[in-house]
Image (cartoon, helix red, strand yellow):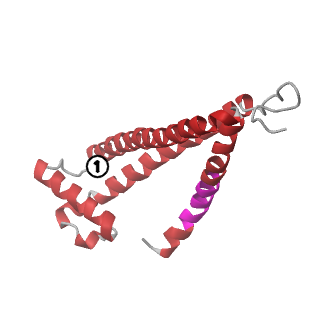
Amino acid sequence: MSATTYWSLLPGLLVFGTGLAVVLTVNDPVSLDMVPVQHHGQASGVSATAEQFGGALGIAIFYLVFHATYVDRFVSNVSKSSLADLSDAQVERFRRDIQDAEQTGLHPDTFDPALNAYLDAARDGSYFGYTVVFTLLSGLAIAAVIVMARLVRRPEPAPGGDDATGSP
């Protein structure tokens, strides 16, 4: 990956990191502010469990979407081109070469020359898959902001001047 590629990724990574920091730093206080002090331990446990489960489930679902759109686009690109369909052995070799490239970087000159022509179709499929996933994630984030703006409210003070957290 070239230095110019890193610079083109930097704005998105900064927005992602900022958003993640905002969500994670307010998640625990908001969930704890909504319950009495004597239940903070349980609320914290439920919040942490939901955060971990939601993260794992989200990664699994969005990887499934990425993979399905990537494979579909790759197959479509190969079908529309003058490239021949790959044999099972060639598919396995191409998959292995792509996986190796994840560790060392993509160097087309190290690929089997017969498979090199398929790299453009794979790159386009990958870009398309990421575009679909990031678009879905953006839509989900916008929907979440709207839902949170409507649902998250400061707790009503309890009678006698104490709020729901038990502080005076």
| 12 falls in the magenta region | yes
Q: Residue at the spot x=63%, y=54% of the render?
A: 21
Tell me where residue 45 appears, x and y as whole percent: 54, 39
Q: Is residue 132 left or right of residue 141?
A: left
Secondary structure of the magenta portion, mostly? helix
Compared to 128, does 142 lie above or below?
Answer: above
Compared to 160, does 83 lie above or below?
Answer: below
Compared to 34, does 109 lie above or below?
Answer: below
Q: Residue at the spot x=84%, y=29% of the render?
A: 157
Disc 1 residue type? Ser
Of the 4 image quadrants, the one containing the C terminus is top right
On the image, which quarter does residue 29 sit in? top right
- Magenta range is 8-19
Badge 1 density bin: few <14, some 14–19, many ≥20, Cα 10 Å: few
Tell me where residue 31 appears, x and y as whole percent: 65, 37
Residue at numbered disc 1: 81
Q: Residue at the spot x=43%, y=42% of the render?
A: 56
Tell me where residue 52 appears, x and y as whole percent: 48, 43
Q: Residue at the spot x=18%, y=51% of the render?
A: 91
Of the 4 image quadrants, the one containing the N terminus is bottom left
Residue at far bottom of view: 3
Residue at far right of view: 161
Label 1 residue SS: loop
